[in-house]
Amino acid sequence: MAEGLLRHEAGATCDVSSAGTRPTQVRPEAIAVMREAGIDISGHRSKSVDEFLGQDFDYVITVCDNARETCPVFPAQTRRIHWSIEDPAAIQGSEEERLEVFRQARDELRVRLRTFVQEQNLLPEKGPPHQ
């Protein structure tokens, strides 16, 4: 969800990659709640952070405590940011209960990523006004 939200908020101003320390699949609940927000992540795939070892990044943002503890070390110039957000995939319950937890995670990520984009001046260029 974070990858889709950041791509949406920052546009082409930055390259965005997303990975996990224990990737499985893009959860159908994530696809559903992102679709509600007008963002299609159905073509995304769950990737391992190991795919990105040796690459340079300006920022590495971890969003769960386990990832913070197990995320590999990136070069010294990489700024690490951590947001402790409950993992919605860990929640059991009815479909509606799971969707609600995914919505909460989506909304928290959206607020944090909008702030991040503004603070880092990553706002997409606006074209000329439509007439």
Image (spheres, rainbow, N blue to C red):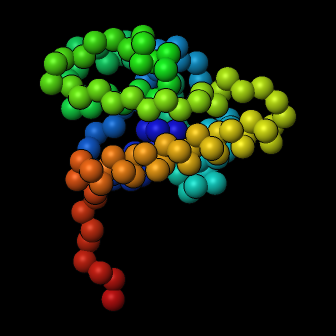
Give the image quarter of residue 17.
top left
In the picture provided, is 112 more to the left or to the right than 80?
Answer: right
In-front residue for pair 42/70: 70
What is the residue that sits farthest to the left in this orientation? 77
> Which quadrant holds residue 60?
top left
Q: Position of residue 120 (x, y in %)?
A: 24, 48
Q: Image point 53% across, 32% down: which residue?
A: 85
Image spot of residue 20 (x, y percent): 47, 20
Q: Position of residue 101 (x, y in %)?
A: 68, 38
Residue drawn at point x = 42 percent, y = 18 percent: 68
In which quadrant will I find the C terminus? bottom left
Q: Nearer the viewer, residue 58 or 12?
A: 58
Left or right: residue 54 versus residue 92 is left
Name the residue at 26% across, 71% down: 127
Q: Which residue appears at 64% of the width and 54% of the height?
A: 36
- Circle count: 0
Please say if 33 is above or below 17. below
Left or right placement of residue 109 versus residue 126 in this view: right
